[in-house]
Amino acid sequence: MDKAIIVDRLVKNFEVTEKEPGITGAIKSLFSPKKKAVHALRSISFTITPGELVGFIGPNGAGKTTTLKTLSGLLYPTSGFVEVLEHDPWEKRSEFLKQISLVMGQKNQLWWDLPAIETFELNRAIYEIPKKEYEKNLTELVDLLGTGKLLTTPVRKLSLGQRMRMELTASLLHRPKVLFLDEPTIGLDLVAQAKVRDFIYEYNREYGATILLTSHNMDDLINLARRVIVIDEGKILFDGALEELVNKFAKEKIINVTLSGEDDIKKIESIGKIKKMAFPQVTLSVPRAATAVAASELLQNFPVEDLTIEEVPIEEIIRKVFRGALRK
Amino acid sequence: MNKYWQIFKISFQQEFAYKVNFIMWRVRNVFQIFLIFFLWDSIFSDPGRVVFGYDRAKILTYVFGVLIVRALVLSARAVDVSADVAKGDLSNYLLKPISYFKYWFTRDISSKALNISFAIGEFTLLFLILKPPFFFQLDPLILIAFLASIVIAIFIYFNLLFMVSAIPFWAPELGWGGHFLVTIIMIEAFSGALFPINILPASIQPIVLATPFPYLIYIPIQVYLGNVTGIALFRTLFLGVSWCVALWLAMNNIWQRGIRVYESIGR
């Protein structure tokens, strides 16, 4: 198997009934419901090799979750081809389901009124995990996520962060080869975020699991994903290494100058856009193509003590992605 | 098989998570029986009176029969399925190597096991307090036929619940409305849970009997009372099984279509 996931020209449309606000709107929609087709995915294609950890990024409603749901067999594709671990996810075969897991940051699979350990035991039976393997996996997961003391507490009494770690445990007891994570760190505090993040990293490294992750958390993406797929309005805008994202989308470069004496600083504005000014340091942003010219102009016309040229930070590009600012 | 045994156990525990809630519900059940009992008891206050072909002993046997049959047939957890569909929690099950139908059937069985154990206690208690004239069926063949009719009733109810629960695939806001209409109004009125079907006007009876609803309560009790025997008994059981098959096929068909339009909402 040289590809863990194959997606080819996948299309998914939804039909949504629209309702105007208020009671009049409710009555209107009762008699003449207005249907609107939503194009969640407009022919997307990509492949993922086993063991890859790929970040899915895009603004809200871009189609990330729809993709994950289609890949895990929850949604029936409108058209196109999907294959995960050589299975058609829609068939929901047991052999397939035993090898995957979808973790949704806001969906609960744990039994709300019972301690998490009960859900784990149930999953052991459902996934037919041999007793020894189950105990080994559980001990490992509990150690990694630091949840040992919470196993017998009813789930409803756990905090969001504790519950999320339990969700992860429940989803991983059967050692899935492919893991779909939808906003795994949503709503967690910084410590819990880091714990979950470290865990995902370890899980990928140790078991060679293929992981597809969506997140609005900058740190998740920068620390975990080597490859990112940028999706917006149901289309893939970029698919490649995280670093290349900058080359592709940053239209500018950053020049940091340290001046040795006061000069007519106003004049600097003609060279580039001033991003920050704290004398004697000035940060400018200049068009990529004009970087060399701008730098030499600075050196010739100003008392420059030091000058460095940098790429736009990746965070800024990702922020742009989330704002939907990469649309053409 | 072990999967479903685990589900049975966890489901049982879940029922006990809200103990007070459970107790209140049982208390309500007892009150309901009291109410129906006194209603009929006052209608039949004159011991010689016969209304709709029922005398006091017969109708009170019917009322107590309802208590047991209700606990076996109409107690089901699968009423929660429509919420699963509407809120997108169904996703949790579709992702697992498990049959969703069998999952809920197991939960139903566990709920029934719990309910029947309490219903028997309540039955004994009410029996001692009210001392109703009750007809104990001793013919083993009739008792076997009664059990068969209960199994049929359980399957019919399960299929009906799942069909109604599929409504939110297309109309998420109708989940409760559908249950209200079918599970509460239709079933209460036409299953025989409130009154025996044969007190209805003769022109309406055949219509009601042509629906699957009487197979839930009315028919099992009639079988128990020995009112259906011989060829008629076979015919009744055969029709019951036919309803099971027909509803199962219809339910499967509806669900297969439903899953296709399922949007797995809530993120």
Image: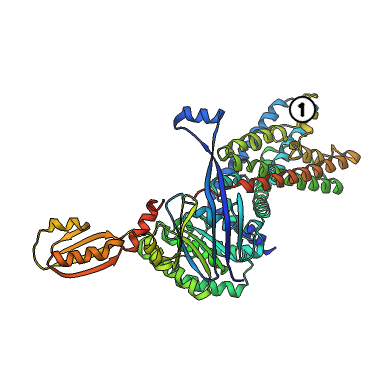
In the image, taking residue B43 as reference, residue A292 lies left or right, namely left
Mark 1 crowd level (few <14, some 14–19, many ≥20, 10 Å Cα): few
Q: Is residue A106 above or below residue A260?
A: above
Q: Is residue A197 visible?
A: yes
Q: Give the camera-side residue of A111 and A239.
A: A239
In the image, taking residue B76 as reference, residue B22 lies left or right, namely left
Kindly identify which chain the residue marked by label 1 belongs to.
Answer: B
x, y (%) of residue A237? 45, 56
Q: Is residue B54 visible?
A: no
| Quarter of the figure that contains the N terminus of chain B | bottom right
User: Which secondary structure, mark 1?
Assistant: helix
Q: Give the camera-side residue of A266 and B21.
A: A266
Q: Which residue is denoted by mark 1 in the rendering?
A: B199
The amino acid at mark 1 is: Ile
- Residue at image position (34%, 60%) is A250
x, y (%) of residue A300? 15, 66
Q: Quadrant of residue A136?
A: bottom right
Q: Give the camera-side residue of A123 and B39.
A: A123
x, y (%) of residue B186? 68, 33
